Amino acid sequence: MAVYLCHEDPDLLRHEATVVDSRPGAVAL
């Protein structure tokens, strides 16, 4: 089961991530 960052830290409004892959409608970070 995936753990979502917004569930782990709902008060976090900004984070850094690297886009590793993307396609229409989806992005892998």
Image: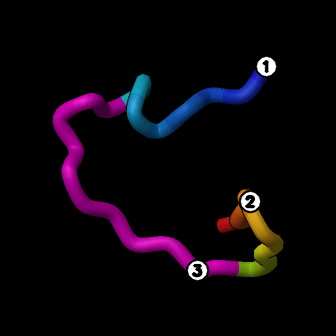
Query: Is mark 2 in CB contact (under 8 Å) with mark 1?
Result: no
Which numbered dot is residue 26?
Answer: 2
Query: Mark 2, residues whose alpha carbon is within 10 Å: few (<14), some, or many (≥20)?
Result: few
Q: Rounded to the nearest whole Å, what is the CA distance between mark 2 and mark 1?
A: 18 Å
Please give the residue where the numbered disc 3 appears in the rendered image: 18
Q: Amino acid at mark 3?
A: Thr
Residue 11 coordinates in the image, percent (x, y): 17, 35
Q: Rounded to the nearest whole Å, what is the CA distance between mark 1 and mark 3?
A: 22 Å
Q: Rounded to the nearest whole Å, what is the CA distance between mark 3 and mark 2?
A: 14 Å
Residue at (55% x, 33% y) in the render: 4
* In the rendered image, the vertical position of residue 9 relative to residue 24, given as above or below: above
Q: Secondary structure at mark 3?
A: loop
Residue at (79% x, 19% y) in the render: 1
Please give the residue where the numbered disc 1 appears in the rendered image: 1
Residue at (27% x, 29% y) in the render: 10
Left or right of residue 2: residue 10: left
Q: What range of the chain is rendered magenta?
A: 9-19
Q: Secondary structure at mark 1?
A: loop
Q: Residue furthest front?
A: 24
Q: Amino acid at mark 2?
A: Ala
Q: Residue furthest top?
A: 1
Left or right of residue 16: residue 14: left
Q: Secondary structure at mark 2?
A: strand
